[in-house]
Image (cartoon, coloured by chain):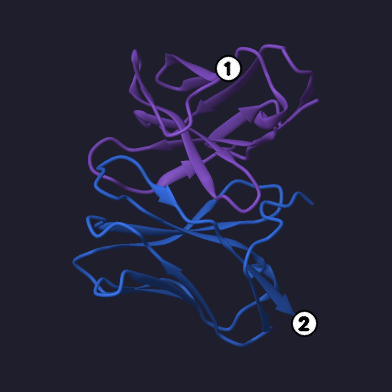
């Protein structure tokens, strides 16, 4: 079984709809991250969390919100989706302590029409 | 398959040759660097990392070189195979102990 899973894998929605992307991990890591990937721009950090009830904004948090429901679960919401939020979204986990490798899920392709 | 970068720099190599992928990083405070491989339709996968107290680190068929003087990182892949075809990302930590800053990636194409 995959260590970091994301659902759904693909989603097409319309402008103005609320969308939730979910991430679960079995690695036992404290840190969880949400990234967005656009063509030619690499990965950009949306939100991150060090523990349940700890939520921090990344570089592109506007238009997004997150919830850390448990150590193993971190969900990303688009309150009112817009077309320029069409992208690949990745969840990642990391060990507590200093900077280290992050472990990525398979991604969610979101299309906003 | 999905494209993760429509206008990425591309390196094309012959199967069996060595590949060198370069990365210029931006923050002099960075002390941790990492290379990821991303195949079409998948999330990034760890390849190798290096900390700033080293200038070279080797893994299985891969070597990372770090030149702090010119803020340059490179990934060398020996005896490149078709399965190495992917997009490769470098990342640095900047002045953070928990965040990574990703480059825009390089596409590696391996010719049979």
Compare residues A40 and B3 and report the one nearer the observer.
Answer: A40
Residue at left 62%, top 54%?
A40
Chain painted in purple in the figure? A
Residue A74 at x, y percent in the picture = 49, 21
Residue A24 at x, y percent in the picture = 53, 25
Q: Secondary structure at mark 2?
A: loop
In the rendered image of this protein, does residue B96 appear above or below residue B88?
A: above
Which residue carries the number 2 mark?
A: B112
| Residue B27 location, quadrant | bottom left
Chain painted in blue in the figure? B
Q: Check disc 2: other Cα within 10 Å, few if <14, some if 14-19, many if 20+.
A: few
Which residue carries the number 1 mark?
A: A77
Residue at left 30%, top 74%?
B70
Of the residues tagged 2 and 1, which is closer to the observer?
1
Q: Are marks 2 and 1 in contact (CB under 8 Å)?
A: no
Q: Are marks 2 and 1 on the same chain?
A: no
């Amino acid at each position: 079984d995959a260590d970091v899973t994301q659902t759904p894998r693909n989603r097409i929605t319309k402008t103005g709809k609320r969308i939730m992307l979910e991430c679960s991990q079995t690695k036992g890591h404290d840190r969880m991250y949400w990234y967005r990937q656009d063509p030619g721009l690499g990965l950009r950090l949306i939100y991150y969390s060090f523990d349940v009830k700890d939520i921090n904004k990344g570089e592109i948090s506007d238009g997004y919100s997150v919830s850390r429901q448990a150590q193993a679960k971190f969900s990303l919401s688009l309150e009112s989706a817009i077309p320029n939020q069409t992208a690949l979204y990745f969840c990642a986990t990391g060990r507590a302590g200093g900077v280290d490798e992050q472990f990525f899920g398979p991604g969610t392709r979101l299309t906003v029409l | 398959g999905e494209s993760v970068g429509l206008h990425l720099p591309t390196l094309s190599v012959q199967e069996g040759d060595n590949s060198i992928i370069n990365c210029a990083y931006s923050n002099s405070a960075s002390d941790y660097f990492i290379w990821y491989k991303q195949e079409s339709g998948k999330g990034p996968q760890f390849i190798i990392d290096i900390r700033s107290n080293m200038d070279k680190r080797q893994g299985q068929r891969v070597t990372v070189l770090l030149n702090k003087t010119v803020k340059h990182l490179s990934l060398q892949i020996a005896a490149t195979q078709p399965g190495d075809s992917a997009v490769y990302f470098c990342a640095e930590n900047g002045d953070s102990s928990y965040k990574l800053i990703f480059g825009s990636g390089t596409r590696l194409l391996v010719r049979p």
